[in-house]
Amino acid sequence: MTIASILNALLFAVLGIVVFAVGLLVVARALPGNLWKQALVDHNLHAAIVLAGIALAIGWIVAAAVH
């Protein structure tokens, strides 16, 4: 493995994480109410499940796009 391939993998990993985080924030902001407060402060299980589903979906999309 060369240094160039390691740097390339790190670049794609960082790019994927950034795109994932931005996508998750955009979708969470687009939903009505404060989904983060519902899931983390009020311990609403349904809000946490919605956030997990959004995170999985965006993660799969980003992984497919980077791959």
Image (cartoon, grey):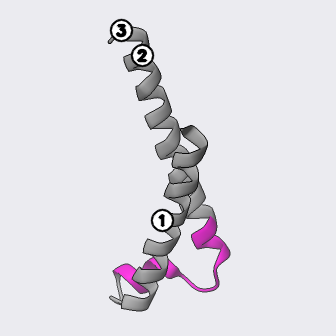
Question: Which residue bears the numbered disc 2?
Answer: 5
Amino acid of disc 3? Thr
Image quarter hosting the C terminus? top right
Dominant SS of magenta comes to helix
Label drawn at residue 55: 1
Find the magenta span and give its range. 27-40
Residue drawn where x is 40% and y is 81% of the image: 48
Question: Which residue bears the numbered disc 3?
Answer: 2
Q: CA distance from mark 2 to mark 3?
A: 5 Å
Residue drawn where x is 59% and y is 86% of the image: 33
Amino acid of disc 2? Ser
Residue drawn where x is 48% and y is 65% of the image: 55
Do the residues under discs 3 and 1 have CB atoms within 8 angstroms? no
Residue 18, horizontal then vertical, whole percent: 51, 44
Residue 51, horizontal then vertical, whole percent: 47, 75
Between discs 3 and 1, the one toward the N terminus: 3
Residue 36, horizontal then vertical, whole percent: 46, 76
